[in-house]
Image (cartoon, rainbow, N blue to C red):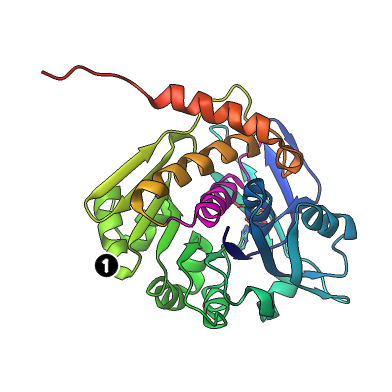
Amino acid sequence: MGKLVIVGTLAFDAIETPFGKTDKILGGAATYIGLSASQFNVDAAIVSIVGGDFPQEYLDLLSNKNIDISGVEIVKNGKTFFWSGKYHNDMNSRDTLATELNTLADFNPIVPEDYRDADIVMLGNLHPLVQLSVLNQMTVKPKLVILDTMNFWMDCALKDLHTVIKKIDVITINDEEARQLTGEYSLVVAARKIHSMGPKYVVIKKGEHGALLFNGDNVFFAPALPLEEVFDPTGAGDTFAGGFAGYIAKTGDTSFENMKNAIIHGSTLASFCVEKFGTERMQDLSNKEVHKRLLQFKQLTQFEIELA
Ligand code: AMP
């Protein structure tokens, strides 16, 4: 079983969806990635930063999932990163109402010694120079480096983003962001352009419309599971990425064929994330529930067709 390093935000989120509104609750890319990857019992560590206002119980929640948090810096007099967003009625798009970097503005990530030889590195959505710094601390070349990013960093740090994108293997990005990064409407053309920027594998997330995996001329598509209850899509992309990374870390197989399964695991875990506000649904998700949903996924996508 492989080691996994995750860098990303531990945050307070305030979320509004057509179904309700929350005050500051636990959020952050690394939180969702970690909770999702912990389903695979891999040796995972989070590298992040929080302020003195971040409750110990949130850190305990991660530790209790066997996630190493020795790489989480606590700035006693500082404030934790805060993000607030409001979803439109279709829940596929949202407006960011506030992004307060707080302690994140001066984040200098330190990867714990024990994780500098990790097999898989998951660079969660953060300033590209922070992502690069984590990569530069690895003493052994990782088997796979996965990067997630968003329009915020394209708007304010595009040059640095290109520098880090050049050095990674897999990028996970949503459809709108893929179009912004490449200036192309067609996702096939956009994926080809992103390949030419560095990553051999391009995963384009399309929210409730599933995800595409491109590797040169190889393409794989997985739908999202049709759900009865969707309360809050926050963190679905990170949960997907955490499931993808966790499955690859567990299996140690970075082939395109295995990545297809990683996509299915990522989509399955993301389908739970959206059922409740914030991280609530992910906090005590059982293996049994996940297994049942994987079976549903198989049934949804399998068919026999007679071709003449
Ligand atoms: P997702 O819905 O998968 O895009 O992820 C939502 C999470 O990303 C929230 O929990 C936020 O705390 C976090 N987030 C939002 N904006 C940023 C940002 N600019 N940098 C890092 N993390 C962010």
Label 1: element kind: helix
What kind of residue is marked 1?
Answer: Ser
Tell me, yes or no, if residue 179 can be seen here. Answer: yes
Q: Which residue is mark 1?
A: 196
Quarter of the figure with the C terminus: top left
Decide: few, some or many residues near mark 1? Use Cα within 10 Å; few <14, some 14-19, many ≥20. few
Q: Position of residue 185 (x, y in %)?
A: 29, 50
Q: Is residue 94 above or below residue 89?
A: below
Q: What is the quadrant of residue 45 in the picture?
A: bottom right
Q: Nearer the viewer, residue 119 or 244?
A: 119
> Does 240 appear in magenta?
yes
Tell me, yes or no, if residue 186 can be seen here. Answer: no
Instruction: Identify the residue at image location x=56%, y=72%.
Output: 127
Quarter of the figure with the N terminus: bottom right
Q: Is residue 57 left or right of residue 181?
A: right
Instruction: Identify the residue at image location x=46%, y=78%.
Output: 160
Q: Position of residue 166 (x, y in %)?
A: 37, 74
Q: Nearer the viewer, residue 206 or 133?
A: 133
Instruction: Identify the residue at image location x=57%, y=61%.
Output: 2
Most common SS among magenta residues: helix
Q: Which residues are magenta?
A: 231-253
